[in-house]
């Protein structure tokens, strides 16, 4: 089985961060979101992975991922020149995928469950021995579903009595179930006929839901599994911070950096080698990146501070700071996502005023 990770989105919901960086490289607990998907595939035994990239952000993603050897996999890069839909990604990955089964994963999604059980269930169903007197139809696809409180906002699956998918309905007024599609799919080679047979939707894209519906309509079995644990689309700030909290909750304490005698490290805290904590308190769960200096400050729970940052005379909690950012003389920074090479300071000049230089698509709250 091969893997296909879609990593070409523009990340408009995370601007301005994504004006200068791919959304799939925004860190969760100091690790790029994309890396979690690659690691999940590797853990499921997948060794060949194709990654769909866009021209604007592809080079940066290639630089971070490399050839895949750091994950124990081999990477093939596939460029999608225009965002023409998830099914279009399958279409352009045809040469890489060949006639193999594959798992398709949205590169900005995060799953607590991982992929191993999902992949094993599909392989077992595909390879099951027929039993006497029992019709066995191997599935052409398997989708992952999650129970949601507002199914009218999602693509929703109608499930038949034998556990098969009967119909997929996009944002239905009267939902047939509360089971919404999650961004993980398993396919056999039949999907290639499906994506070649559907027409673009009203928004001009080849929709993967239409391709799966084509499989159902044409008599192919589509199985499903209901997600265990959490699932988050990290495409917006607040869900990204929530995902950061959930991942930080799994940390094990590891203090490898330098902590002076006037500092306190409380709870599940990771301080990477090369970081320095001076006359400060870090309360976990939290992670402090290599080369970062925290001085005369408080870093509270659910904070991820990337490499080479500097925090001085400030208080921070429930926030994600990207590399080389600095925070100086800020009484409290909370619920925030701070981009690379960003400076947040308190000015002392009189008359006192708020002075800012903000790019497009920023959101600023002033106390």
Image (cartoon, helix red, strand yellow):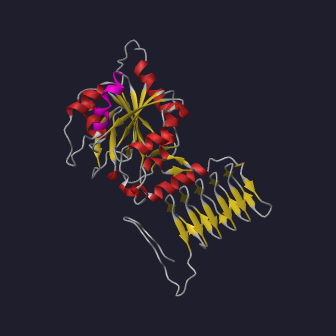
Residue depicted at x 39% and y 11%: 132
User: Of 44 and 311, which appears nearest the observer?
Assistant: 311
Q: Position of residue 365 (x, y in %)?
A: 47, 73
Nearer to the camera, 350 or 146: 350
Magenta region: 87-99
* Depicted 192 relative to depicted 348: above or below: above
Tell which residue pokes out farthest to the bottom in this image.
351
Q: Residue furthest top?
A: 132
Residue 151 inside the magenta-drawn segment: no
Which secondary structure class fits the magenta region best? Answer: helix
Query: Is 219 drawn above or below residue 53 in the view shown?
Result: above
Q: Is residue 227 left or right of residue 275?
A: left
Residue 96 is one of the magenta-drawn residues: yes
Quadrant of the rendered image containing residue 71: top right
**Is residue 96 found left or right of 118 in the rendered image?**
left
Q: Is residue 333 left or right of residue 295?
A: left
Give whichever of 197, 66 is nearer the camera. Answer: 66
Residue at horizontal 31%, vertical 37%?
89
| Left or right: 113, with 182 as reference point | right
Q: Is residue 167 visible?
A: no
Question: Percent x, y for residue 202?
Answer: 19, 48
Residue found farthest to the right: 261
Figure disc tally: 0
Could you say where residue 56 lies in the image, as x and y percent from the top left? 35, 47
Quadrant location of the N terminus in the rendered image: top left
Q: Residue at x 61, y 73 (%)?
A: 329
Q: Which residue is more in the foreground, 276 or 216? A: 276
Measuring from the top left, give residue 285's x and y in whole percent.
Answer: 64, 54
Can residue 183 be seen here?
yes
């Amino acid at each position: 089985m091969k893997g296909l990770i879609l990593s070409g989105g523009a990340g408009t919901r995370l601007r301005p961060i994504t004006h200068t960086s791919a959304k799939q490289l925004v860190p969760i607990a100091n690790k790029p979101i994309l890396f979690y998907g690659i690691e999940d595939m590797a853990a499921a035994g997948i060794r060949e992975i194709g990654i769909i990239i866009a021209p604007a952000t592809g080079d940066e993603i290639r630089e971070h991922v490399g050839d895949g050897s750091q994950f124990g996999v081999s990477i093939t890069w596939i460029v999608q020149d225009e965002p023409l839909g998830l099914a279009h990604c399958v279409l352009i990955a045809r040469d890489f995928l060949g006639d193999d089964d594959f798992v398709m994963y949205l590169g900005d999604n995060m799953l607590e469950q991982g992929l191993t059980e999902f992949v094993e269930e599909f392989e077992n169903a595909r390879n099951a021995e027929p039993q006497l007197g029992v019709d066995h139809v191997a599935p052409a696809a398997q989708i992952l579903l999650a129970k949601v409180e507002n199914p009218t906002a999602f693509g929703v699956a109608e499930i038949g009595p034998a556990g098969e998918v009967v119909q997929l309905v996009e944002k239905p007024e009267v939902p047939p179930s509360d089971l919404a599609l999650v961004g993980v799919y398993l396919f056999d080679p039949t999907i290639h006929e499906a994506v070649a047979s559907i027409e673009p939707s009203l928004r001009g894209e080849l929709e993967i839901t239409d391709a799966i519906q084509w499989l159902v309509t044409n008599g192919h079995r589509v199985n499903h599994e209901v997600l265990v644990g959490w699932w988050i689309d990290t495409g917006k700030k607040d869900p990204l911070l929530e995902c950061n909290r959930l991942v930080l909750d799994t940390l094990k304490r590891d203090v490898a950096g330098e902590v002076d005698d006037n500092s306190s490290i409380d709870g599940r805290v990771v301080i990477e080698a090369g970081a320095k904590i001076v006359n400060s308190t870090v309360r976990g769960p939290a992670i402090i990146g290599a080369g970062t200096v925290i001085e005369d400050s408080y870093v509270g729970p659910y904070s991820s501070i990337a490499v080479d940052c500097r925090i001085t005379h400030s208080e921070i909690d429930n926030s994600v700071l990207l590399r080389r950012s600095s925070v100086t003389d800020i009484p409290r920074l909370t619920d925030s996502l701070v981009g690379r090479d960003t400076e947040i300071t308190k000015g002392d000049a009189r008359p006192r005023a708020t002075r800012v230089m903000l790019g497009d698509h920023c959101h600023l709250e002033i106390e």
